[in-house]
Image (tube, grey):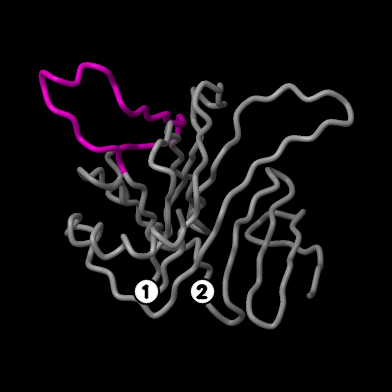
């Protein structure tokens, strides 16, 4: 395992971890958070298409209470064509353009990336009854021209000296898979289901 400090994508305080198969770059200045995960000599899987599941649609007049929230940062333009809000998924395509950031109170337990024939899935924990930062967000997406980040957030916790807090994500990567285009949401949902069963 190689561990070294180096500059990456304009950030100066980063930690690189690598073995003979994969490299991880951890941004320490604004985090810590992982901003690059790639096979050696491969693509950064964070420069991809993000897939975020939506809660099931309700019916009117039966469902009067809201079942989702969206938090927007001042530089986020919802008319940007990188974002597509579908019935089953939010799709976000990373591109060489300026920043976008939004947060969700995310109840669907997972989010992921698609890059070619690779699928990256991660769990998004939500503890009911707890307060979360950024207007109640337990999930946030940020992108710029360098990368696309899917971030889970833990709830506010009061921690005394000597105590610790724990926040757990589970990650899994699948290779050599074929998924329908996300415009076919039902086909995509059916195709991704066996992989989700291995994550959740």
Q: Secondary structure at mark 1?
A: loop
> The magenta stretch spans which residues?
54-78
Q: Is residue 28 left or right of residue 47?
A: right
* 80 to 49, vertically: above or below: above
The residue at the far right in this view is: 162
* 38 to 75, vertically: above or below: below
The residue pinned by badge 1 equals: 116
Q: Position of residue 7 (x, y in %)?
A: 73, 62
Q: Answer whether labels 1 and 2 touch (C-beta < 8 Å).
A: yes
Q: Nearer the viewer, mark 1 or mark 2?
A: 1
The residue pinned by badge 2 equals: 43
Depth order, front residue of 118/190: 190
Q: Is residue 171 left or right of residue 79?
A: right
Let me know if residue 101 is in the magenta part.
no
Q: Position of residue 96 (x, y in %)?
A: 43, 59
Name the residue rendered at 37%, 60% in the picture: 49
Q: Secondary structure at mark 2?
A: loop
Q: Tell me if mark 2 has few (under 14), some (14-19) or many (20+) residues whose alpha carbon lies within 10 angstroms of its own.
A: few
Depth order, front residue of 140/173: 173
């Amino acid at each position: 395992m190689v561990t070294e400090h180096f500059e990456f994508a304009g950030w100066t305080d980063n930690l690189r971890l690598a073995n003979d198969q994969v490299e991880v770059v951890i941004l320490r200045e604004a985090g810590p958070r992982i901003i690059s995960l790639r096979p050696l000599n491969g693509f950064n899987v964070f420069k991809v298409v993000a897939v975020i599941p939506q809660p099931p649609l309700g019916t009117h007049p039966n469902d009067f209470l809201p079942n989702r929230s969206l938090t927007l940062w001042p530089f986020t333009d919802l008319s940007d064509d990188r974002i597509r809000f579908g019935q089953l998924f939010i799709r976000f395509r990373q591109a060489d353009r300026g920043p976008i950031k939004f947060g969700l109170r995310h109840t669907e337990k997972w989010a992921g990336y698609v890059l070619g024939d690779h699928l990256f899935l991660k769990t998004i924990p939500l503890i009911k009854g707890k307060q979360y930062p950024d207007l109640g967000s337990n999930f946030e997406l940020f992108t710029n021209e360098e990368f696309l980040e899917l971030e889970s957030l833990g709830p506010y916790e009061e921690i005394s000296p000597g105590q610790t807090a724990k926040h757990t994500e589970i990650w899994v990567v699948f290779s050599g898979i074929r998924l329908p285009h996300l415009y076919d949401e039902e086909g995509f949902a059916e195709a991704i289901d066996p992989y989700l069963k291995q994550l959740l």
